[in-house]
């Protein structure tokens, strides 16, 4: 089953304190001022919060699925994924873990439980 922008929206907006905003033709989801997920204008890819020290390994492991952020976003904890390359369960996990990086620690632990060690 192909993941759509609407699937991402449904998962993201169910997470506490999430706000949806349009920024430069991208649908973004944020907690406070921290964006944790963004959908590309053509809705083919999703950028999401991810530890920058781990992203090169993630992209190298599955280059057909994950790709580096735009050069202007490389300074952030951010990586991108093709929506057609993931299933709904993987999308849900990516969105929830990205939200965990943006949400207050107590809120994240109360909503999703303890963080999974990488």
Image (cartoon, helix red, strand yellow):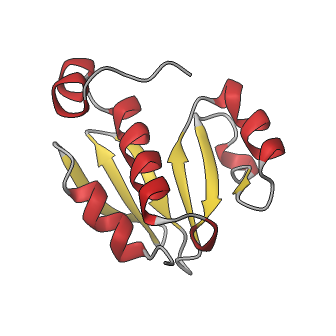
Q: Is residue 55 above or below residue 43?
A: above
Q: Is residue 96 above or below residue 66?
A: above
Could you say where residue 84 lies in the image, as x and y percent from the top left?
Answer: 60, 74
Which quadrant of the figure has residue 7? Answer: bottom left
Q: With 113 as the anchor, is 117 left or right in this view?
A: right
Q: With 55 as the anchor, is 15 left or right in this view?
A: left
**Tally of marks:** 0
At a point 69% along the width and 24% down the height, the residue shown is 53
At a point 58% along the width and 34% down the height, the residue shown is 77
At a point 59% along the width and 41% down the height, the residue shown is 78
Q: Which is more toward the observer, 84 or 41?
A: 84
Could you say where residue 68 lies in the image, as x and y percent from the top left?
Answer: 74, 49
Q: Is residue 38 above or below residue 100?
A: below
Say which quadrant the C terminus sits in. Answer: top right
Which quadrant of the figure has residue 83? Answer: bottom right
Q: Is residue 73 above or below residue 52?
A: below
At a point 47% along the width and 47% down the height, the residue shown is 94
Could you say where residue 117 lies in the image, as x and y percent from the top left?
Answer: 50, 18
Q: With 83 as the anchor, is 18 left or right in this view?
A: left
Could you say where residue 58 lies in the image, as x and y percent from the top left?
Answer: 72, 40
Q: With 56 as the anchor, is 112 left or right in this view?
A: left
């Amino acid at each position: 089953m192909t993941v759509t922008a609407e699937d991402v929206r449904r998962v993201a907006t169910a997470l506490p304190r999430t706000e949806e905003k349009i920024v430069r033709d991208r649908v973004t989801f944020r907690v406070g001022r921290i964006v944790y997920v963004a959908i590309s204008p053509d809705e083919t890819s999703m950028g999401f919060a991810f530890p920058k020290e781990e992203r090169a390994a993630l992209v190298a492991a599955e280059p057909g699925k994950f790709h580096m952020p735009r050069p202007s976003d490389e300074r952030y904890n951010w990586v991108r994924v093709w929506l057609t390359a993931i299933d709904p369960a993987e999308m849900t996990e990516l969105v929830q873990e990205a939200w965990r990086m943006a949400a207050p620690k107590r809120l994240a632990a109360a909503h999703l439980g303890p963080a999974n060690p990488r």
